[in-house]
Amino acid sequence: MARILVVDDEPSIRMLIRTILQGEGHQITTAANGREALEMVIENVPELIVLDLMMPEMDGWHLLEELHIRGLRRHTRVVIVSGHYDPQGASEDRKAHAHHFLPKPFDPSSLVELVNDALDRDPKELYAGKDRTVHLQRLIERIDEVMN
């Protein structure tokens, strides 16, 4: 079925999600943090990423930003599975990075349902008609940081 990358710093959560989604017939690879995931996505963009937010080395938000800056975010869907996501506190810009959010702890059937729904969507749908000015400004700020 689909190639899915599971990104979570907790080995037991990675294994649980891997087992659930393999049971649905998907091909699963895993990464322990955003930096490892970024390297994997650069090599081979998965159809979907199941992503935790709070991780060492590179958190989930930073990974999504890097994927966007590199032009890879348009080619994959994202389901965030995290115990640290507050939908009311998240900016609209951050909300626009994922197709679905699932709080931990989660019900396996809810994960399967959200993954299937995300896979039915065009990965580019989140960006259709959106103003990318905020992302361009962040890129300019990052370039300025590196240059100074």
Image (spheres, rainbow, N blue to C red):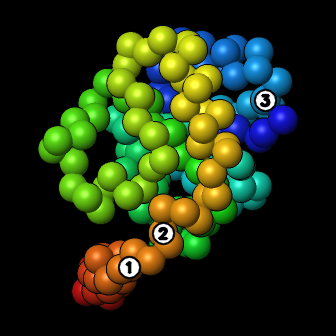
Report, in whole angstroms, how far the alpha carbon at label 3 lies from the one at label 2: 26 Å
The numbered mark at residue 12 is: none
Q: Are marks 2 and 1 in contact (CB under 8 Å)?
A: yes
Above-or-below relation of 40 to 6: below
Between circles 2 and 1, the one closer to the viewer is 2
Number of residues whose C-alpha sits closer than 10 Å to that of mark 2, classed few (under 14), some (14–19) or many (20 or more): few
Return the residue at label 3: 26
Secondary structure at numbered mark 2: helix
Q: Nearer the viewer, residue 126 or 49?
A: 126
| Residues tagged 3 and 2 counted as in contact (Cβ below 8 A) | no
Residue drawn at x 15%, y 44% as measured from the top left: 89
Query: Residue 88: horizontal and vertical position, in percent?
Result: 17, 41
Earlier along the polypeptide chain: callout 3 or callout 1? 3
Identify the element where label 1 is drawn.
loop
Hey, which quadrant is residue 80 in on the image?
Answer: top left
- Residue corresponding to mark 1: 132
Q: Quadrant of the C terminus?
A: bottom left
- Count of marks, rendered view: 3
Q: Nearer the viewer, mark 3 or mark 2?
A: 2
Q: Is residue 34 left or right of residue 38?
A: left
**Residue 131 appears in view:** yes
11 vs 65, nearest the viewer: 65
Q: Residue 2, relative to residue 73: is it above or below? A: above
State left or right for residue 2 relative to residue 32. right
Q: Nearer the viewer, residue 10 or 147?
A: 10
Q: Name the residue at 51% across, 39% down.
A: 79
Q: Amino acid at mark 2?
A: Tyr
**Which is nearer the N-term, disc 3 or disc 2?**
3
Residue 84 appears at what percent x and percent y? Answer: 27, 30
Q: Quadrant of residue 41?
A: bottom right
Q: Amino acid at mark 3?
A: His
| Residue placed under numbered mark 2 in the picture | 127
